Structures are given as structure tokens and as C-alpha cells.
Image (cartoon, grey):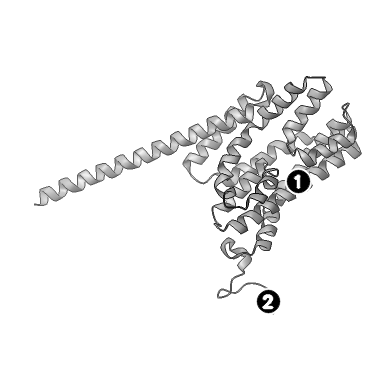
């Protein structure tokens, strides 16, 4: 007997709206697996930075399980090594992670559907990859339970990958950074996130403007280039969408006027 789905009995796992919560959880892991693999070398970069710093390996390693914020963790390692005041260190981490305000706002409608006891632990798993992957899934599945377990599958897969990458970097030490150009993993990972979200003209404009501004602002203090790029990208996308809507309205108005004129002349 063939295991392939037949036309009259499709495999329910292929349709988001008919998945069970367990299948949604597994679908989340499968959806983010390529990105989770890309997180591994990024975690290795952080682990290597911990080894080369004055921070205890155990403290640096456990931070990946608690903080789960790559760029902010790397910045904190540098600031702690430079004996920066704790207010500067914490403030810098908050500025770097300011983009999570946007992710939180976007995820808020779906989070509002979850039981309260789930919200705090799920919020701990928010990353760039988790937010984007889950938001794309939410467009096709409107069941709160399946959304929740899909999100958990995505978030936990990334959490494990980041932690494993961190401990590999700590175990191998400086030999990791000397042998591989791991910094390429970061832009490739964000590129993988960007492409699936481009679905129309406004999202394309937002992606191009956001990427260009981020590149130009890469040397802005406190690593806020990504946040600045996101703000310009969102603004460009909104303007493009508004212009497109206005153009469509003008076209409909002109067509209506022409139709009215034609009807009048026929009478």
C-alpha cells in the first residue's frame, strides 16, 4: 500500500487548518529547521567570545538559555570586559533589542488568545526567526491552539540550537573563529527570513529600503542600524501601500466617471 495521500483523502498534516496540536508543533520545528541550523554557527561565535573574555564559561553559557539574544549578548560580553557600568550594559542591551517591541506588537493579537499562564514563557522565546516564521504561519491557520504549539516548536528548536552552538563555541574556543568565517552566518540567516515575507510591491519596497538603510547605518553606535533600517523599511512600505491604494481609487473614480458619461450620451 502506498503511504502517499490520494486526491480524495489528502494528508491532513499538509493543511494547517486540519493539523492537531502535536502536528503543529512538529510543523514549527520543520519550518524553522534551516534557520536553526544557521543559528548554530552564530552561537559558536558567541561561545568563542565568552572564552576570550573575562566572563566565566558557565556564566556565559547559561546566559544563552536565559537571555536568548545573540547581538545583545555579544555586546554585553564586550561591555563587561571593558568594565562598563551596569547601567550602560543594560541600556545598550535594551537599545539593541528595541526591535522586539515591533515583534511583540505584531504577535499581540495571537498571544491574546492564549491562556495567561502560557504568555510569559512564550514571550521568553521571541527571536527574529520565531516572530517572522510564526507570523507567516498565522496567516494560514487561525486556530489558537495550533498557533500556540507551532510557535513553541519554532521557539524551542531555536533555543536548543542557540544553546548547543554556544557550548560548542565554548568547548572549542578560539580555534573555531580562526578556522571558519562564522560572521557570514548572521546576514545569511536574516536573508532567509526576509525572502518569504516578500509578497507584494509594498513588502518588496520595504525590504529593499530596510536592507539599504541597515547597510548604510551599520556603524551607528549601539548597534541600532537594524532598528533604524526596520523603521525606514516600514515607513517606505506604508507609503508605497498608501500610494497604490490612492492610485487604485483614482482609477476607479475615473472609470466610474467615464461610465456615467457614456450612459448619459446613450440616453
Report x, y in % for residue 215. Answer: 62, 28
Q: Which residue is mark 2?
A: 2
In this rendering, would 119 be left or right of 41?
Answer: left
Determine the secondary structure under disc 2.
loop
Farthest residue to the bottom: give it.
1
Binning the other alpha carbons within 10 Å of mark 1 as few (below 14), some (14 to 19) or many (20 upward) gives many
Residue 214 got which mark?
A: none
Front label number (1 vs 2): 1
Residue 110 x, y percent position in the rendering: 57, 50
Q: Residue at x 35, y 39 (%)?
A: 247
44 over 78 or under it: above or below: below
Q: Where on the picture, by quarter, is residue 241?
A: top left
Alpha carbon of mark 1 to alpha carbon of mark 2: how far?
37 Å
**Is 6 left or right of 74, judged from the image as shown?**
left
Q: Nearer the viewer, residue 209 or 17?
A: 17
Q: Residue at x 69, y 52 (%)?
A: 152
Q: Quadrant of the N terminus?
A: bottom right
- Pick the residue in front: 84 or 196: 84
- Residue 102 rendering spot, x and y as whole percentages: 58, 37
Q: Give SS at disc 1.
A: helix
Q: Residues within 10 Å of mark 2 (few under 14, many from 20)?
A: few
Q: Is residue 216 visible?
A: yes
First along the sequence among labels 1 and 2: 2
Q: Quick check: 157 above or below 1?
A: above
Looking at this view, is 201 or 134 the one in front?
Answer: 134
Q: Quadrant of residue 229?
A: top right
Q: Residue at x 77, y 30 (%)?
A: 74
Residue with the mark numbered 1: 159
Amino acid at each position: 500500500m502506498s503511504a502517499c495521500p490520494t486526491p480524495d483523502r489528502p494528508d491532513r498534516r499538509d493543511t494547517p487548518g486540519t493539523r492537531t496540536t502535536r502536528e503543529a508543533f512538529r510543523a514549527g520545528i520543520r519550518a524553522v529547521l534551516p534557520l536553526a541550523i544557521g543559528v548554530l554557527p552564530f552561537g559558536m561565535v558567541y561561545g568563542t567570545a565568552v572564552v576570550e573574555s573575562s566572563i566565566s564559561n558557565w556564566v556565559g553559557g547559561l546566559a544563552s538559555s536565559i537571555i536568548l539574544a545573540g547581538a545583545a549578548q555579544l555586546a554585553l560580553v564586550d561591555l563587561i570586559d571593558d568594565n562598563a557600568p551596569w547601567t550602560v550594559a543594560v541600556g545598550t542591551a535594551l537599545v539593541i533589542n528595541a526591535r522586539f517591541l515591533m515583534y511583540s506588537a505584531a504577535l499581540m493579537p495571537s498571544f491574546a488568545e492564549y491562556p495567561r499562564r502560557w504568555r510569559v514563557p512564550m514571550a521568553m522565546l521571541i527571536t527574529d526567526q520565531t516572530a517572522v516564521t510564526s507570523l507567516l504561519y498565522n496567516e494560514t491557520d487561525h486556530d489558537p491552539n495550533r498557533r500556540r504549539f507551532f510557535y513553541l516548536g519554532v521557539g524551542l528548536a531555536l533555543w536548543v540550537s542557540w544553546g548547543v552552538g554556544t557550548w560548542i563555541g565554548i568547548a572549542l574556543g578560539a580555534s573555531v573563529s580562526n578556522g571558519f568565517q562564522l560572521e557570514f552566518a548572521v546576514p545569511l540567516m536574516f536573508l532567509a527570513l526576509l525572502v518569504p515575507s516578500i509578497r507584494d510591491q509594498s513588502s518588496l519596497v520595504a525590504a529593499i529600503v530596510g536592507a539599504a538603510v541597515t547597510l548604510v547605518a551599520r556603524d551607528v553606535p549601539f548597534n541600532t542600524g537594524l532598528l533604524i533600517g526596520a523603521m525606514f523599511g516600514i515607513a517606505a512600505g506604508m507609503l508605497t501601500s498608501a500610494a497604490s491604494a490612492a492610485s487604485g481609487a483614482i482609477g476607479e473614480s475615473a472609470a466610474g466617471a467615464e461610465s456615467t458619461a457614456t450612459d448619459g450620451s446613450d440616453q
